[in-house]
Image (tube, grey):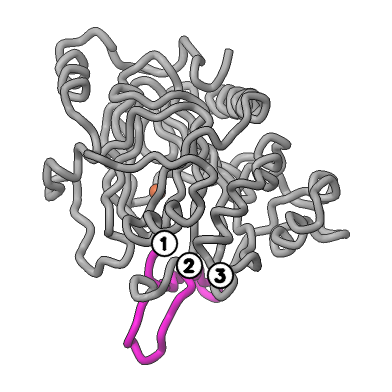
Amino acid sequence: MTAGEVRELGWIGLDPKSPAIDSLKSTLASEPGLKGFDVFSPDAISAIAKAFHRDGFAVVKDVLSPQALASLQTGCDRVVQEMLSLDPEARGNRGSHRYSFGGASLTGAQLHQPEWVELLEVSSVMQMIEAIFGSPDFIVRSAGGDFCLPGAIDYQPLHSDISDRKEITLKPGKTLVLGSFSDPEGLVDYRDLPCPYISCNFLTSDWTSLNGPIRQIPGTQRSHQPIPSLDEEPDWMRVSRLFPLKAGSIILRDVRAWHGGTPNVSQFVRCMPNVEFLAPWYREPVVRSLPLALYDRLEPMAKYRCRYIVEQPGSPLRLGYRREFGGTPENSRSRPKVR
Ligand SMILES: [Fe+2]
């Protein structure tokens, strides 16, 4: 059983044979996906970087070896099964049947899982990140990603993974700071910067029109336009889904670029674990998430890149799941939480 083939999961409280689902399947099957996007080979480093800067993302095939892919599938299977045992109603934390691996975890990451740690040493990915940032001195922010179950029938609203700096008062004396970039003179915001933050998403299964590929809107990474809600979103954006793609491929995303999940009406879980990198010149508060025992096995450069997230001697990580997996953020809600 692999992450691309987990059966008998999903469709909780839904009838996959209902006329409404049949109609959704037909629509999804008839839509072509994002037209003409490039799928690069791992050695096309400069073309990958160029496409990334132009479009806000780049797709690369054949990145994971069969062994590396099998290991990642095993890890995803294990974590998916564990999370679903805690959420039998498939309420999810990115809408119904839709989950963030990182958001569910107390550390905001899955770096206590060895299969995610293996992703820190995929040398071709590190070369691509270096080419995009123009320097080898980038750092690892986190590693998590997402998955959606069969029966994730809603579109996740388009969103960007970072936002303007906001300070929210939780209770007197306790303030939550979201986002980090802030210009006291208000002349520039994060949209005016070169790419500060990359997510490398790994595909553990083939992506088709029916199993919930993400939709990605090219060229939106520096846009100051408001991101359309589901009601406002034009058809051409809604159908900009990335498929067909093969397991072992990656999607490098400038996390500012607008994107969102789409329905999974297949019989298979669609997983997309990730690693997140910050540019050499960009910093934001990060949460320590990498156990020392796993860090110790890394090669020196990977260790250096993980210096802000490794467990500190004498301060053991608190591992486990957040209550309700951290809940679904406002910008991922496509319908009321309780149906
Ligand atoms: Fe996202």
Which numbered disc, 2 or 3, marks the residue that appears first in the sequence?
2
Q: Residues within 10 Å of mark 2 (few under 14, many from 20)?
A: many
* Residue position marked by numbered label 3 in the rendering: 284
Amino acid carrying label 3: it is Glu
Query: Quick check: 65 above or below 226?
Result: above
Residue at the location (30% across, 34% down)?
Answer: 262
Check residue 130 for magenta coloring: no
Q: Residue 196's mark? A: 2
The residues colored magenta run 161-189
**Residue 192, how many percent across, how many down?**
34, 75
- Label 3 residue SS: loop
Which numbered disc, 1 or 3, marks the residue that appears first in the sequence?
1
Residue at the location (25% across, 40% down)?
Answer: 36
Amino acid carrying label 1: it is Ile
Check whether the beta carbons of the residues at disc 1 and disc 2 lie within 8 A of each other: yes
Could you tell me which quadrant the N terminus lies in? top right
In-front residue for pair 172/83: 83
In the picture provided, is 83 more to the left or to the right than 294?
Answer: left
In the picture provided, is 22 more to the left or to the right than 163?
Answer: left
**CA gap, disc 1 to disc 3?**
11 Å
Q: Residues within 10 Å of mark 3 (few under 14, many from 20)?
A: few
In the picture provided, is 128 more to the left or to the right than 258?
Answer: right
Check whether the beta carbons of the residues at disc 2 and disc 3 lie within 8 A of each other: no
The answer to whether mark 1 is within 8 Å of ligand 1 is no
**CA gap, disc 1 to disc 2?**
10 Å
Amino acid carrying label 2: it is Pro
Question: Chief secondary structure of the magenta span?
Answer: loop
Q: Residues within 10 Å of mark 1 (few under 14, many from 20)?
A: some
* Residue position marked by numbered label 1 in the rendering: 162
Could you tell me which quadrant the C terminus lies in? top left
